[in-house]
Protein backbone atom coordinates (compact mmCIF):
# COMPACT_ATOMS: atom_id res chain seq x y z
CA UNK A 1 0.00 0.00 0.00
CA UNK A 2 1.63 3.31 -1.04
CA UNK A 3 2.25 5.86 1.68
CA UNK A 4 1.77 9.54 0.97
CA UNK A 5 4.50 11.83 2.36
CA UNK A 6 2.94 15.04 3.58
CA UNK A 7 4.37 18.47 4.34
CA UNK A 8 6.13 18.76 7.67
CA UNK A 9 3.82 21.41 9.17
CA UNK A 10 1.22 18.86 10.32
CA UNK A 11 -1.49 21.52 10.21
CA UNK A 12 -4.08 19.42 8.42
CA UNK A 13 -7.24 18.57 10.31
CA UNK A 14 -6.66 14.82 10.01
CA UNK A 15 -3.19 15.03 11.48
CA UNK A 16 -4.15 17.41 14.28
CA UNK A 17 -6.96 15.04 15.20
CA UNK A 18 -4.63 12.03 15.02
CA UNK A 19 -2.14 13.76 17.32
CA UNK A 20 -4.82 14.29 19.95
CA UNK A 21 -6.09 10.73 19.66
CA UNK A 22 -2.59 9.25 19.96
CA UNK A 23 -1.89 11.37 23.05
CA UNK A 24 -5.19 10.38 24.62
CA UNK A 25 -4.69 6.68 23.84
CA UNK A 26 -1.14 6.70 25.20
CA UNK A 27 -2.06 8.20 28.58
CA UNK A 28 -5.07 5.92 28.96
CA UNK A 29 -3.34 2.67 28.01
CA UNK A 30 0.32 3.43 28.85
CA UNK A 31 1.35 2.12 25.40
CA UNK A 32 0.78 3.34 21.85
CA UNK A 33 1.96 1.78 18.58
CA UNK A 34 3.20 4.00 15.76
CA UNK A 35 3.05 1.80 12.62
CA UNK A 36 6.21 1.91 10.53
CA UNK A 37 7.92 4.12 13.13
CA UNK A 38 8.03 2.43 16.55
CA UNK A 39 6.02 2.63 19.77
CA UNK A 40 5.58 4.75 22.88
CA UNK A 41 5.11 3.57 26.44
CA UNK A 42 4.70 5.13 29.87
CA UNK A 43 6.47 4.02 33.03
CA UNK A 44 5.38 5.46 36.37
CA UNK A 45 7.70 6.09 39.28
CA UNK A 46 6.06 5.62 42.65
CA UNK A 47 5.22 8.49 45.00
CA UNK A 48 7.88 9.35 47.57
CA UNK A 49 7.39 10.49 51.16
CA UNK A 50 9.31 13.56 52.32
CA UNK A 51 8.72 13.54 56.09
CA UNK A 52 11.06 16.48 56.67
CA UNK A 53 8.90 18.82 54.59
CA UNK A 54 5.63 16.98 55.33
CA UNK A 55 5.03 16.17 51.66
CA UNK A 56 4.26 13.21 49.46
CA UNK A 57 5.63 13.85 45.97
CA UNK A 58 3.41 12.90 43.07
CA UNK A 59 4.25 9.82 40.96
CA UNK A 60 6.23 10.76 37.85
CA UNK A 61 5.26 9.51 34.41
CA UNK A 62 8.17 8.79 32.08
CA UNK A 63 7.40 8.47 28.36
CA UNK A 64 9.74 6.16 26.47
CA UNK A 65 10.19 5.55 22.75
CA UNK A 66 11.16 2.23 21.21
CA UNK A 67 11.83 1.56 17.54
CA UNK A 68 10.26 -1.87 18.01
CA UNK A 69 6.69 -1.94 16.69
CA UNK A 70 3.73 -3.55 18.41
CA UNK A 71 0.21 -4.70 17.60
CA UNK A 72 -1.99 -1.82 16.42
CA UNK A 73 -5.44 -3.40 16.90
CA UNK A 74 -6.27 -1.54 20.11
CA UNK A 75 -5.32 1.86 18.71
CA UNK A 76 -7.15 1.25 15.43
CA UNK A 77 -10.36 0.33 17.26
CA UNK A 78 -10.02 3.35 19.55
CA UNK A 79 -9.50 5.82 16.69
CA UNK A 80 -12.29 4.23 14.61
CA UNK A 81 -14.75 4.63 17.50
CA UNK A 82 -13.73 8.24 18.16
CA UNK A 83 -13.79 9.32 14.50
CA UNK A 84 -16.63 7.03 13.37
CA UNK A 85 -14.54 5.74 10.49
CA UNK A 86 -13.98 2.18 9.42
CA UNK A 87 -10.72 0.55 10.44
CA UNK A 88 -9.38 0.44 6.88
CA UNK A 89 -9.56 4.22 6.60
CA UNK A 90 -8.10 4.59 10.09
CA UNK A 91 -5.23 2.26 9.18
CA UNK A 92 -4.42 4.39 6.14
CA UNK A 93 -4.65 7.63 8.15
CA UNK A 94 -2.42 6.25 10.90
CA UNK A 95 0.21 5.02 8.46
CA UNK A 96 0.19 8.38 6.69
CA UNK A 97 0.54 10.14 10.02
CA UNK A 98 3.56 8.06 11.04
CA UNK A 99 5.09 8.50 7.59
CA UNK A 100 4.61 12.23 8.07
CA UNK A 101 6.49 12.03 11.37
CA UNK A 102 9.45 10.38 9.67
CA UNK A 103 9.32 12.93 6.84
CA UNK A 104 9.26 15.79 9.34
CA UNK A 105 12.34 14.40 11.10
CA UNK A 106 14.28 13.87 7.88
CA UNK A 107 13.38 17.33 6.58
CA UNK A 108 13.59 19.46 9.71
CA UNK A 109 15.64 17.20 12.03
CA UNK A 110 12.80 17.34 14.50
CA UNK A 111 9.16 16.29 14.86
CA UNK A 112 6.81 17.18 17.69
CA UNK A 113 3.87 15.32 19.20
CA UNK A 114 2.08 17.91 21.36
CA UNK A 115 1.70 16.78 24.95
CA UNK A 116 4.14 13.90 24.44
CA UNK A 117 7.53 15.10 23.25
CA UNK A 118 9.96 15.63 20.40
CA UNK A 119 11.76 13.24 18.07
CA UNK A 120 15.29 13.89 16.81
CA UNK A 121 17.87 12.00 14.77
CA UNK A 122 21.40 11.76 16.12
CA UNK A 123 24.61 11.76 14.07
CA UNK A 124 24.37 7.99 13.69
CA UNK A 125 20.87 8.15 12.25
CA UNK A 126 19.17 6.85 15.40
CA UNK A 127 15.82 8.30 16.41
CA UNK A 128 16.03 10.03 19.80
CA UNK A 129 12.98 10.94 21.87
CA UNK A 130 12.79 13.77 24.39
CA UNK A 131 9.75 13.91 26.64
CA UNK A 132 7.87 17.16 27.19
CA UNK A 133 7.54 18.41 30.74
CA UNK A 134 4.23 17.28 32.17
CA UNK A 135 2.26 20.31 33.48
CA UNK A 136 2.60 20.90 37.23
CA UNK A 137 -1.18 20.61 37.53
CA UNK A 138 -0.75 16.85 36.96
CA UNK A 139 2.10 16.55 39.47
CA UNK A 140 0.79 18.32 42.54
CA UNK A 141 2.48 17.32 45.78
CA UNK A 142 0.27 16.34 48.71
CA UNK A 143 0.74 17.69 52.22
CA UNK A 144 1.15 14.80 54.62
CA UNK A 145 1.60 15.13 58.38
CA UNK A 146 2.69 11.88 59.95
CA UNK A 147 0.26 10.75 62.66
CA UNK A 148 1.81 8.66 65.39
CA UNK A 149 -0.57 6.70 67.59
CA UNK A 150 0.65 6.37 71.19
CA UNK A 151 0.30 2.60 71.34
CA UNK A 152 1.46 1.84 67.81
CA UNK A 153 5.03 0.78 67.14
CA UNK A 154 6.85 2.96 64.62
CA UNK A 155 10.40 3.41 63.40
CA UNK A 156 12.50 6.30 64.67
CA UNK A 157 16.07 7.41 64.00
CA UNK A 158 18.34 7.92 67.02
CA UNK A 159 21.62 9.40 65.84
CA UNK A 160 22.54 7.21 62.89
CA UNK A 161 20.80 4.11 64.20
CA UNK A 162 17.27 3.00 63.42
CA UNK A 163 15.16 1.69 66.28
CA UNK A 164 11.52 1.67 67.40
CA UNK A 165 9.57 3.71 69.90
CA UNK A 166 8.83 0.52 71.87
CA UNK A 167 12.52 -0.29 72.33
CA UNK A 168 13.32 3.28 73.39
CA UNK A 169 10.45 3.29 75.90
CA UNK A 170 11.74 0.05 77.43
CA UNK A 171 15.28 1.46 77.55
CA UNK A 172 14.27 4.62 79.41
CA UNK A 173 11.91 2.68 81.69
CA UNK A 174 14.79 0.45 82.81
CA UNK A 175 17.02 3.48 83.32
CA UNK A 176 14.30 5.23 85.33
CA UNK A 177 13.84 2.18 87.56
CA UNK A 178 17.57 2.16 88.34
CA UNK A 179 17.50 5.88 89.15
CA UNK A 180 14.38 5.55 91.29
CA UNK A 181 15.98 2.83 93.49
CA UNK A 182 18.98 4.84 94.72
CA UNK A 183 17.12 5.88 97.87
CA UNK A 184 16.65 2.23 98.85
CA UNK A 185 20.42 1.76 98.94
CA UNK A 186 20.78 5.00 100.87
CA UNK A 187 18.32 3.76 103.53
CA UNK A 188 20.19 0.48 103.78
CA UNK A 189 23.47 2.31 104.35
CA UNK A 190 21.88 4.58 106.98
CA UNK A 191 20.38 1.56 108.74
CA UNK A 192 23.75 -0.18 108.79
CA UNK A 193 25.38 2.93 110.19
CA UNK A 194 22.76 3.21 112.93
CA UNK A 195 23.12 -0.47 113.75
CA UNK A 196 26.89 -0.04 114.04
CA UNK A 197 26.45 2.92 116.39
CA UNK A 198 23.94 1.03 118.54
CA UNK A 199 26.29 -1.93 118.86
CA UNK A 200 29.20 0.38 119.66
CA UNK A 201 27.41 2.28 122.40
CA UNK A 202 25.93 -0.91 123.76
CA UNK A 203 29.39 -2.44 124.09
CA UNK A 204 30.72 0.76 125.66
CA UNK A 205 27.98 0.78 128.30
CA UNK A 206 28.56 -2.87 129.18
CA UNK A 207 32.25 -2.27 129.60
CA UNK A 208 31.55 0.70 131.92
CA UNK A 209 29.24 -1.33 134.15
CA UNK A 210 31.75 -4.13 134.42
CA UNK A 211 34.46 -1.68 135.42
CA UNK A 212 32.36 -0.24 138.26
CA UNK A 213 31.60 -3.65 139.76
CA UNK A 214 35.20 -4.71 140.29
CA UNK A 215 36.30 -4.56 143.99
CA UNK A 216 39.73 -3.16 144.86
Image: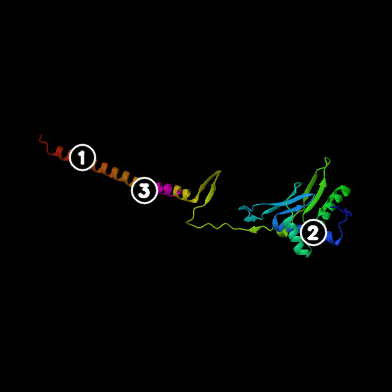
Left or right for 68, reference 105? left
In this rendering, which labeled residue sits more in front, label 1 or label 3? Answer: 3
Label 3, label 2: how far apart the Cα atoms are:
95 Å
Label 2, label 1: how far apart the Cα atoms are:
123 Å
Element type at mark 3: helix
* Mark positioned earlier in the residue sequence (2 or 1): 2
- Give residue 188's quadrant in the image: top left
Residue farthest toward the top in the current orientation of the protein:
216
Instruction: In this rendered view, identify the residue nearer to me: 130 or 135.
Output: 130
Query: Which residue is denoted by mark 1 in the rendering?
Result: 203
Range shown magenta: 172-181
Q: Is residue 135 visible?
A: no
| Number of numbered labels in the structure image | 3
Q: Tell me residue 187's x, y (percent).
A: 32, 47
* Mark positioned earlier in the residue sequence (3 or 2): 2
Query: Which residue is denoted by mark 3 in the rendering?
Result: 183
Left or right for 114, reference 195? right
In this rendering, which labeled residue sits more in front, label 2 or label 1? Answer: 2
Left or right for 144, reference 171? right
Q: Residue at x 70, y 57 (%)?
A: 29
| For residue 141, above or below residue 199 | below
Query: Which residue is denoted by mark 2 in the rendering?
Result: 88
> Which colouring convention does the figure follow?
rainbow
Element type at mark 1: helix
Specify whether residue 94 is painted magenta. Answer: no
Secondary structure character of the magenta stretch overall: helix
Residue farthest toward the left in the current orientation of the protein:
215
Element type at mark 2: helix
Label 1, residues with CA under 10 Å away: few <14, some 14-19, many ≥20? few
Q: Tell me residue 27's x, y (percent).
A: 72, 57
Q: Tell me residue 137's x, y (percent).
A: 72, 60
* Mark positioned earlier in the residue sequence (1 or 3): 3
Amino acid sequence: MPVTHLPGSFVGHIFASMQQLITSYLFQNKICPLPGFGSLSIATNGAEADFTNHLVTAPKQIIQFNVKEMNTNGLLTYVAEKTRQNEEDVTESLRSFCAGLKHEISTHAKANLPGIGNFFVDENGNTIFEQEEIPEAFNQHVTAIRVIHPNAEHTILVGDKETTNTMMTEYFSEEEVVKDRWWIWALVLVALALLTLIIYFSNSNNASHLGNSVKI
